[in-house]
Image: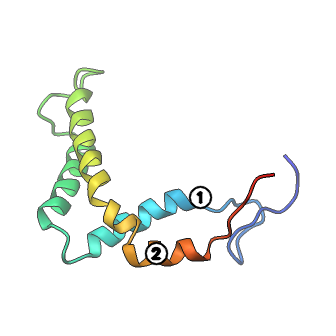
Amino acid sequence: MSDAKLPGPAGAPARVRPVPPVKMGLFKAFFTFLRDPSAPVLGKLFVFAVLAYVVFPIDLVPDFPVVGWIDDAGFAALAVWYLSGALEKYRNPPELAAGATEELPVHRGQ
C-alpha cells in the first residue's frame, strides 16, 4: 500500500477512505424513508419489529446453533425484501434522476 493520501472529507485523517456512494445512498434512502410522513407506518413498525426480534434473545425457536437461527434469518429476509421495494422511491427520486443524467459526462471508448 502506498503512502499517498486518499481523497476524503475535509479535516479527515489522511488514511480514512470515504464511504462508497452506493452504501451512502442506501443509508440516506433508509433514513429518508423513516422521516417521510407519507411512508406507511406499518412498514416502519415492521422493520423495527424485525430488528428487535433479531437482536433480543426472546425468540419463537430458542437460539440453538443453526436450527434456532432459521427463524431470525427468515424474518430478516422478509424485512430486506420489503425494504428493497420500499427504498426504490427514495434511492432514485424522479426530480433528481432527470437532472443528474444531463450533467454526467459521457465516456466514449476508443
Looking at the picture, which amino acid does disc 2 mark?
Ala
Residue 28, image quadrant: bottom left
Residue at the (28%, 54%) spot, across then down: 85
* Residue 92, x across and y down, in percent: 41, 66
Residue 3, image quadrant: bottom right
Q: Secondary structure at mark 2?
A: helix
Q: Are marks 1 and 2 in contact (CB under 8 Å)?
A: no
Residue at the (29%, 68%) spot, across then down: 33
Residues 64 and 92: in front is 92
* Residue 34, x across and y down, in percent: 27, 69
Q: Is residue 35 left or right of residue 71?
A: right
- Which residue is denoted by mark 2 in the rendering? 98
Q: CA distance from mark 1 to mark 2?
A: 22 Å
Q: Is residue 62 left or right of residue 69?
A: left
Residue 19, image quadrant: bottom right
* Residue 110, x across and y down, in percent: 81, 51
Q: Is residue 58 left or right of residue 102?
A: left
Q: Secondary structure at mark 1?
A: loop
Picture disc at residue 110: none
- Which residue is denoted by mark 1 in the rendering? 20
Of pointers 1 and 2, the one earlier in the residue sequence: 1
Q: Is residue 108 above or below residue 28?
A: above
Residue at the (50%, 78%) spot, across then down: 99
The mark lying in front, picked from 1 and 2, is: 2
Q: Is residue 32 above or below residue 21?
A: below
